Image (cartoon, rainbow, N blue to C red):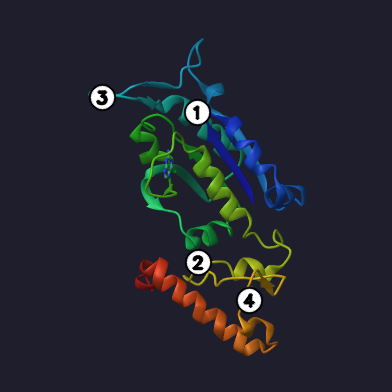
């Protein structure tokens, strides 16, 4: 999968993609992540990329020309399955969206800043808008890093133990059950007996039961959405 990201703060995106699983995905050739500095497409000597909004109001808006020029150039080089705009005023990311995106060939991600981008960019180029939750970040870069991490780890071959991505929290709309490792007892706190029983059908049942109970207690909304 090829992922292009357009950003006004490309530095913010260096470190998240240069660690562990996401780094290995790139080294294995399973994911190619390229960050483009919007400033390079800025207008005039000052490389202007933002301006005040029509109608008045606080905050700068990313201008249409630099983004349009950047997207057009990238679209000349390849066809994108999705052109995604990261913005808090969108549907929130969930595992289903990550699963769907992990099957795409090429995706382009635009990250906003300030008051956002000129609406005409959204109308003309954007095929999908994604928020990562109901709170406001200073820019879309960290949100894009979250999206890319959630998607890339799902690409077949990225996670060695195939089973592990499938049994994550949310993969079946349930939170994960509790997990334990050695020692079996620590300062009087014991690991549940069933996990030491060697009875695997019973262990599976216990885990399903715990996943359901946790979800019911912490995220009952997930059970409503079935
Ligand atoms: Cl995608 N961008 C910004 N700036 N803030 C957010 C967000 C995105 N998702 C949640 N908060």
Between discs 3 and 1, the one toward the N terminus: 3
Answer with left or right where residue 128 lies relative to residue 197. left
In the rendered image, the vertical position of residue 200 relative to residue 68, given as above or below: below
Between discs 1 and 4, the one toward the N terminus: 1
Residue 9, image x and y in percent?
54, 29
Q: Count numbered badges in the picture.
A: 4
Q: Which image quadrant is residue 121 in?
A: top left
In the rendered image, the vertical position of residue 172 relative to residue 135, given as above or below: below
Mark 2 vs mark 4, CA separation in Å:
24 Å
Between discs 2 and 4, the one toward the N terminus: 2
Residue 197, image x and y in percent?
68, 87
What kind of element bears circle 4?
loop
Name the residue carrying label 3.
57
Between discs 2 and 3, the one toward the N terminus: 3
Whether the residues at callouts 3 and 1 have beta carbons within 8 Å, the answer is: no
What kind of element bears circle 3?
loop
Mark 2 vs mark 1, CA separation in Å:
38 Å
Residue 80 visible in the picture: no
Between discs 4 and 3, the one toward the N terminus: 3
**In the image, farthest residue toward the left:** 55
> Looking at the rendered structure, which numbered label has been put on residue 170?
2
Q: Which image quadrant is residue 5 in?
A: top right
Name the residue carrying label 4.
191
**Which numbered mark, 4 or 3, is in the foreground of this view?**
4
What kind of element bears circle 2?
loop
Name the residue carrying label 1.
69
């Amino acid at each position: 999968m090829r992922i292009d990201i357009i950003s006004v703060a490309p530095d913010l995106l260096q470190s998240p993609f240069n660690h562990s699983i996401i780094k290995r995905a790139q080294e294995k050739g399973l994911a190619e992540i390229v960050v483009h500095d919007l400033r390079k497409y800025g207008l005039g000597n000052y490389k202007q990329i933002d301006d005040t909004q029509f109608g008045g109001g606080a905050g700068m808006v990313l201008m249409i020309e630099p983004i349009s020029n950047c997207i057009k150039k990238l679209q000349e080089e390849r066809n994108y399955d999705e052109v995604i705009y990261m913005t808090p005023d969108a549907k929130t990311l969930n595992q289903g969206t990550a699963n769907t995106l992990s099957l795409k060939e090429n995706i382009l991600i635009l990250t906003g800043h300030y008051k956002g981008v000129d609406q005409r960019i959204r109308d003309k180029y954007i095929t999908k808008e994604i928020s990562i939750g109901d709170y406001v970040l200073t820019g879309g870069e960290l949100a894009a890093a979250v999206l890319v991490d959630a998607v890339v780890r799902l690409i077949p071959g990225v996670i060695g133990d195939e089973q592990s991505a499938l049994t994550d929290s949310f993969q079946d709309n349930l939170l994960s059950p509790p997990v334990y490792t050695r020692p079996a007892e620590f300062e009087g706190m014991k690991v549940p007996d069933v996990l030491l029983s060697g009875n695997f059908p019973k262990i599976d049942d216990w885990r399903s039961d715990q996943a359901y109970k946790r979800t019911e207690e912490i995220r009952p909304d997930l059970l409503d959405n079935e």
